[in-house]
Image: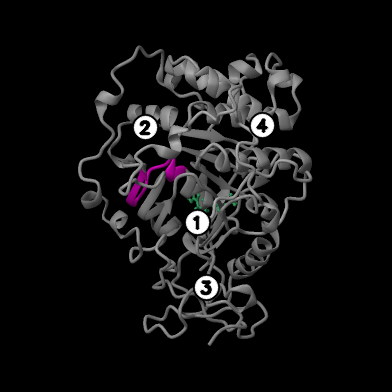
Amino acid sequence: MARRTGSSRGGKRGAVAGSPPGREDRGSRPGEYGAGRDGRVPEHPGGRREDGPDAAPAARAARLTKVYGSGDTTVTALREIDLAFPRGRFTAIMGPSGSGKSTLMHCLAGLDTVTRGRVFIGNVDLSRLSDKQLTRLRRDRIGFIFQQFNLLPTLTAAENITLPLSIAGRSPDRAWMRTVIDAVGLAPRLKHRPSELSGGQQQRVACARALVTRPEIIFADEPTGNLDSRSGAEVLSFLRDSVSELGQTIVMVTHDATAASYSDEVIFLADGRLVDAIANPTAEEVLDRMKHLDAAAGGLAADGEIADDRDDHNDTDGRYGPAGDYDDYAYPDQAYPDQAYPDQAYPDQPTYGRDEHDPYQGHYPERRTGQFEAIPAPDLGPDAGGQPASRRVGGTRHGEEYYSGRSHHRPVPRPGGGPPLTDPGRVDGGGDSYHPDGTEPAGWA
Ligand SMILES: Nc1ncnc2c1ncn2[C@@H]1O[C@H](COP(=O)(O)OP(=O)(O)OP(=O)(O)O)[C@@H](O)[C@H]1O
């Protein structure tokens, strides 16, 4: 498990579009951008909120399990995920198709319910919130960036950026607005409507819109999926800088190793489990890891055995898994007694329909409510567990027909021979090894 170094990495302004620099190029340029006219960067409260020794992570999941369907069509999308997203960090979520990335993000953002476990934004247990409170929490404490930009076509760039504030009845903080607009480089385009902007510019407007409320966390769902590599690099540079320079916390789902290389840490899901993480990733490292995961998700391990479901695959460096430094978070009731989002935080405001309080309503990623049918599980022998795969019928996501079934994940060895994720010697059977070419991976003792 790659440990977080704790080093603060800087922005990538000046990076060649489409070819992000490696680690060594990530020197910080403090104050390079985001400074107001007085040369000071306005403080970002999202990174400081609840500061102190007991500060909660920006978001966290405690034994989060999500099960879709019932009977033959049951799909366990997330299995006992313990995970915390520290403040002021850029985390990428990767994994093979169907590994649970979107489900995790939707649960963390309160867009989907959890089957078991808890999800927190800061200290707020989302399961304790009413729909209305959830909407308001999203509006005030979470920012979203979508693959499709989702700007309002009739509003100018400036109006789109300030929309979350307008809806909340708050007036923009001028210094912060200037910081955000300068950061995305949109000052000359503020009066333009989305149709008059390039895709990259539209996505930068969307980034500014997400940042303008100074949310505690921004969830970005494939933010560069619709952009060419140059525009994608600009957007990623902005996201990187908003973390390094402005203290924003960002969680990004992506399929793109280059995009993930802009993050502080990439975490990998497979078959609904957290299986690995790389701190300060390079695109090459991410690609390499994904190759192994994709191969594992293909079904059978080389030796014909299947993964042992008893292995929780959680890492042990303290961030993941109930045994680490975040032990408290596995027991949220004790760690944060009675910290439900207080009603009084949002005294009743006039409403004009349910959507009125939510600037992103109608723009969230597709809710996965499509019809699923059971399809035969691949013949994996008597130990396969008999869980059928599932296939979505008539649905598309990311412009493709959506198909995803149970994958028989195995722990993936570390490229280059680092210690394996799970200990082969574990008595609980957690040491199943897998290597796509059937060999024992280098580095296994
Ligand atoms: N509404 C639903 N009903 C039944 N199963 C579902 C539903 N939504 C998702 N799933 C299943 O949950 C699992 C995780 O899906 P999810 O969309 O989170 O994966 P993903 O990693 O985001 O995939 P992709 O990379 O293809 O977007 C998959 O096996 C999928 O088939």
Q: Earlier in the sequence, mark 3 or mark 2?
A: 2
Residue type marked 1: Gly
Residue type marked 2: Leu
Q: Which mark is residue 411?
A: 3
Residue type marked 4: Gln
For disc 4, the marked residue is 203
Q: Marks 3/4: CA distance?
A: 36 Å
Residue type marked 3: Pro
49 lies above or below 294: above
Q: Earlier in the sequence, mark 1 or mark 2?
A: 1
| Residue that appears at 69% across and 17% down | 193
For disc 2, the marked residue is 134
Cβ of mark 1 under 8 A from ligand 1: no
Residue stretch rendered in magenta on the structure: 106-120
Mark in front: 1 vs 4: 1
**389 left or right of 183 in image:** left
Q: Position of residue 2 (x, y in %)?
A: 53, 66
**337 left or right of 286 in image:** left
Mark in front: 3 vs 4: 4
Q: Residues within 10 Å of mark 3 (few under 14, many from 20)?
A: many
User: Is residue 150 in view?
Assistant: no
For disc 1, the marked residue is 6
Residue farthest along the bottom direction in this orientation: 445
